[in-house]
Amino acid sequence: MRAQLPADRPVIVRFSQFKERAFDARVADTPAELGEILTAFADAGAGVLHASQRRFWQPAFAGSVLNLAGWAKRLTGLPSITVGSVGLTRDFLRPGRPESVSGLATRLADGEFDLVAVGRALLGNPAWATLAAAGRLAEIADYRKADEDVYP
């Protein structure tokens, strides 16, 4: 893929540390195992690693505060994207907790990862980013599993 794209377009590899309905499934049990996988992606031309985990605020491995995107960046030096329960409820937009927007912003400012993705929250709220940026929090509905049935 890298050879087929212009040099100014990154190859972004998304990987996950869990499966839906199997939250304990792991692609790697240790940072060393994760490093082997991610180094192969980097060597093949990946320019950005998009790390999906169930909850962005939870550590990827015992004994470390880094989430999966933090480990991806640490192990490869590549820019990383975090995602995992970002914005699922309006409570996310209220500061003060590790799982809130302020907790996420602190980790981003600390350089743990480089970008943040919003996923499931957009299913029920396609205008989520616009509403959040405008401070129109009352118009944002909490994510419901049924929102996934809206799109065929």
Image (tube, grey):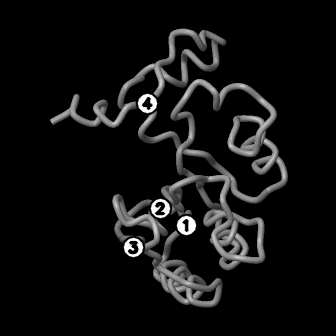
In the image, which is nearer the foreground, mark 1 or mark 3? 1
- The reply to whether discs 3 and 2 touch (Cβ–Cβ < 8 Å) is no
Asked whether the residues under the numbered discs 1 and 2 touch, taking CB atoms below 8 Å apart as contact, a structural biologist would say yes
Vertical order, 14 against 34 (above or below): above
Judging depth in this view, the residue of 60 and 105 nearest the camera is 60
Where is residue 137 shown, x and y percent of the image? 60, 14
Residue type highlighted by circle 2: Ile
Which of marks 2 and 1 precedes in the sequence? 2
Point out residue 42 in the picture as x, y percentages from the top left corner. Answer: 54, 78
Compared across the picture, whether 83 is left or right of 31 comes to: left
Residue tagged 2? 12
Indicate the position of residue 149 as horizontal and vertical percent values: 21, 34
Q: Which mark is residue 47?
A: 1
Q: Amino acid at mark 3?
A: Ala
- Foreground disc of the pair 3, 4: 4
- Front label number (3 vs 2): 2
Mark 1 or 4 closer to N-term? 1
CA distance separating discs 3 and 2: 14 Å
Q: Helix, strand, or loop for circle 2?
A: strand
Q: Nearer the viewer, residue 149 or 136?
A: 149
Front position among marks 1 and 4: 4
Q: Earlier in the sequence, mark 3 or mark 2?
A: 3
